Image (cartoon, helix red, strand yellow):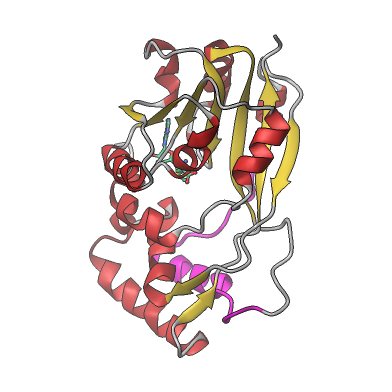
Amino acid sequence: MTRRPYVTAAAHYLRGRPPYSAQLLDVVRAEIGLDGTGTLIDVGCGPGVLAVQLAPLFETVIGIDPEPAMLAEASRHAAAHDVKAAWIEARAEDLATLELPAARLVTFGQSLHWTDRDRVLPAVYELLQPGGAVALIAPAIEHGSPPVDRPAPPIPHEQIEAVIGAYLGWSRGPQEDTYETSLERSPFGESHVAYAPGRADIVRTTDEVVSGYLSMSFAAPDRLGDRLDEFVVDLQALLAEVSPAGRFHDWPGDTVIIWATKRG
Ligand SMILES: C[S@@+](CC[C@H](N)C(=O)[O-])C[C@H]1O[C@@H](n2cnc3c(N)ncnc32)[C@H](O)[C@@H]1O
């Protein structure tokens, strides 16, 4: 049976995940040369974070995700930000069958690795208007520096991941295929890398830190099953030790944009 971690992770996503760089829109506009026209198609849009943040750069916004619970979050998130968008329930592998308009930009926010990249990237290439671009966007924790004077103790990621390991036998594996290498062997070929500065001022409550982890596919509530409550209590106890005030500094790193264009 195919696992669907984002059914149960969806409700935690907007609450717990750190937002992308506040300058993402400016960096994307300058790097890719956008002018407020054309169509954005955000694939694996989840709760619509990228689609909503980049919407001012386009006339039309379309978000695509196979998970209805995510699309429901996206629709609420867009309405709260006065963004008009169409939300389509589909997998990236089905892009060619969706009769979509030619796109100025196709984005994947932390979602390309969920897809069959070697099938999906050629379909994205076809979907773009000449001179259009694909952008693969993610937090880059290793890029940029956290502020020297942190407003609260940092989220104890290593200790939390040890707890997840104890419950689920999970550990962080090596990255096997980078986005750059996927683009390199696709019709796009050469790619470019840009960074938008990370947000230095995100302070989380204990519940938000817990939600951040429950929004991850590897620690989603469906994986924890009937041990979910016990897991949350253990995490809360760990977090209370690290920060009795229940406040944590969340440093997501800069936001990386790996992008490539369709030759015009
Ligand atoms: C880590 S979330 C990213 C959400 C959002 N794009 C962001 O930037 O925060 C990954 C998303 O990819 C979606 N996804 C999983 N498999 C997919 C596929 N084959 N095609 C398109 N999206 C997929 C999931 O449902 C989930 O919403």
Is residue 256 among the parts visible in the rendering?
Answer: yes
Residue 58 placement, left or right of 23: left
Judging depth in this view, the residue of 25 and 240 nearest the camera is 25
| Relative depth, front residue between 204 and 169 | 204
**Residue drawn at x 72%, y 24% as measured from the top left:** 184
Q: Is residue 56 above or below residue 98?
A: below
- Bounds of the magenta segment: 150-177
Whole-percent x, y for residue 226 in the image: 23, 65
The picture quadrant where one finds residue 152 is bottom right
- Residue 181 in the image, given as x and y percentages of width and height: 71, 30
Q: Residue furthest left?
A: 226
The image shows residue 120, relative to residue 148, as above or below, that is above
Q: Position of 190 compared to 202: left or right?
A: right
Q: Is residue 114 magenta?
A: no
Q: Quadrant of residue 230?
A: bottom left
Give the quadrant of ligand 1: top left
Can residue 167 be found in the magenta stretch? yes
Residue located 35% across and 58% down the image = 12
**Quadrant the N terminus occupies:** top left
Q: Is residue 180 among what the camera can see?
A: no
User: In the rendered image of this protein, does residue 142 appear above or below residue 125?
Assistant: below
